[in-house]
Amino acid sequence: MEHTLRRMMDAKSDPLTSLKELVDALRPGKISDTVTAINNTRALCYLLEQHPEYRAALRTQLFALLGTTRQVQLYTDTGILSNESISTAIIRRIGSKLLPPPVKPEYLKDLFGVLFPNHYDYIWLNAIPQEVWFEVGAAAHIEELNPIEIPTHIRLQQLEAIQVLSCRLSAIGLEPEIVLNHPDVERFESPFVRLNAEVLSYIERYREDLTARRPPDEDHLHILVLLEQCETIIAKVWKRAAKNGASVSLTYHLLRLKQHIDRLKTLFQLVDSTPEAKHSPALLGLFLELVKAENRKYSIRDVLAENTELLALQITEHASHTGEHYISETRREWLQMFRSAAGAGVIVGFMALIKILSAKAHLPPLLEAFAFSMNYALGFMLIHILHFTVATKQPAMTAARIAAVLPSLENKKVDTYGELVDLMVKVIRTQFIAIIGNVLLAIPVALGIAWFWWYELGYHVVDTTKATKMLSELQPITGHALFYAAIAGCCLFLAGLISGYYDNKSLYNQIPQRIAALPLLNKIFGENRSRRLGQYIEHNLGALAGNFYFGIMLGSIGTIGFLLGLPLDIRHITFSAANLAYAVVAFDFTLAWPIVAWGAACVAMIGATNLFVSFTLALWVAMRSRKRHLRELQPLWGKFWRRALSRPLDLFIAPKTVAIEDKSA
């Protein structure tokens, strides 16, 4: 490191090469070796503090690099979403990763990638504490710098970046979708428009000071006020979107607005000549943000995460509201859930029969997949229309509800998890009674159908060969039942997301109002019926769409696996229970009870896998959409198990009234 600093003292040394060598000297050998990174940084502080010629050479090299390159693109593009669609951004990143663009030495944006070429540089840089970074600034004696000593080119580039960001911010703030979700912009002067005018005036006065070679003394506090007004509009737009739905493009505009505002605030601190601005954490944050953006500039996952985060929150919020209907508070609601699940069990018994008959028809693969899919999709939609409940659809809905009541990050007390424990107990017992209702009715209905078929037609729905195969398909390992049950759990999770997506889409696009106002519909059914249909669509479109697509997934995955030669299929607890019943009748009730008992145990394992996978995925997405992590649930488990051991019946049977439960809690 000291050798590099000595070389910087040579007037003929290349600034880029010298600074790159210094970064290499600071970089630890392993990503996780944060101690070495901190020690290296403190060693640099010591050398700069002890040798004035070293810090003078470092500042000279840094100013030489900044004074001969264009910085605008680094400040305006790096770490900020561009004005392109998600698909275009993904394609561009893939192309750049496969065939990287050439480095242009005149652009600081490209040279930044040369200084920090490793994909993990941002990790060890972020691991260095803030106070250590401030020690580097103090050792370099940044506070001694006179604003006049900073090359004019550097300041002009920063001012130009502010101007570019301001123009872009004004343009995004006047996008039709933003105006549509904040009508006050049409009645009052938009702060986005006033902001651009004030920024241009500020830059003009600042340039005059630079030309006159006098320290700039421009006040930008009024611009910060305008930026706060812009942030207020963003908050109002998002609040309106939470009620009326959001789109990918709207969330994209909101995210870009927030990024531009944050970057503008930081750049104003960068051009601020006051001593306080030189020690601002925001400037350090900008540096670390630029390094991370440079290291991850080809990351596809980041594009998807940034563009879909707000929309994912909106979708999971709708799923959370739907999940409230899947949580029983009292004994009456608990029994109502049983009746609802029992009705679904009856229909599933007939759906399993149709599936068996469709398979016996030996249709071509694609037609068979269509028949299976329509059986599942229409059956699940019928279950919803009749207000029945399929138990396995609950986790994808209730997970978002659990994430919504998670205590805030500031509140770390275990006592704050009490409400969450109560909610989990309610979810578990509601899920338990729903499964019981599904299975206890699906099995006898299937037994009754199979026996009646044999009694009336003289032969069984399935022969013993098919029944043996159906029993083997229930085996957890040899029959791949658990793996296929996990696939079904993924389908359940996706169905929950689809349901939330269509609920959001219905609100944002005002589909119920459009249906109610459709002239042809009003002419045929009348205005009152059209309005009632619109209201029904408003409350049920998401559920119907989720059930339909869930059925498509269940019915087509097996065929997709067959066509691709992959071991893909599904196992669902309720259909597996019905298939077990059909197999028992096929053997004329002569199966040994251990075989039947093992089959029932396999059905239970399939159900547990369905629930675990769908709930875990749904909870993970719900937590991530709120910028939370699953590890935050760790304090919950001890409290939950203490509650379960002290009052185990609460996990299975609901209290008669809420007051009794609250009193005993």
Image (spheres, rainbow, N blue to C red):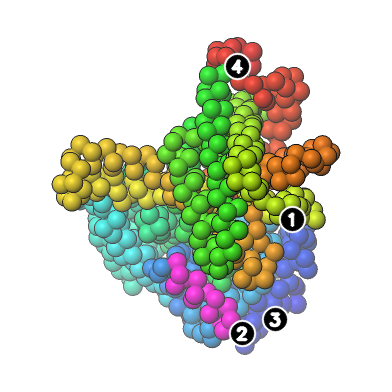
Answer whether labels 1 and 2 touch (C-beta < 8 Å): no
- Amino acid of disc 2: Asp
Instruction: Estimate the spatial distance between the alpha carbons at disc 2 and disc 3, rounded to whole Å.
Output: 10 Å
Residue at image coords 16%, 50% = 519
- Residue that badge 2 annotates: 14
Instruction: Estimate the spatial distance between the alpha carbons at disc 3 and disc 1, rounded to whole Å.
Output: 83 Å
Q: Is residue 206 visible?
A: no
Indicate which label's residue lies in the foreground, 1 or 2.
1
Q: Is residue 444 visible?
A: yes
Indicate the quadrant containing the C terminus: top left, top right, bottom left or bottom right: top right
10 Å crowding of disc 1: few (<14), some (14-19), many (20+): few
- Residue that badge 3 annotates: 7
Residue 186's spot in the image, x, y percent? 19, 50
The magenta stretch spans residue 93: yes
User: At numbered mark 1, what does the secondary structure look like: helix, strand or loop?
Assistant: helix
**Residue 465: numbered disc:** 1
- Residue that badge 4 annotates: 655
User: At numbered mark 2, what does the secondary structure look like: helix, strand or loop?
Assistant: loop
- Amino acid of disc 3: Arg
Instruction: Estimate the spatial distance between the alpha carbons at disc 4 and disc 1, rounded to whole Å.
Output: 47 Å
Instruction: Estimate the spatial distance between the alpha carbons at disc 4 and disc 3, rounded to whole Å.
Output: 78 Å
User: At numbered mark 4, what does the secondary structure look like: helix, strand or loop?
Assistant: loop
- Amino acid of disc 1: Thr
Q: Which residues are magenta?
A: 86-100
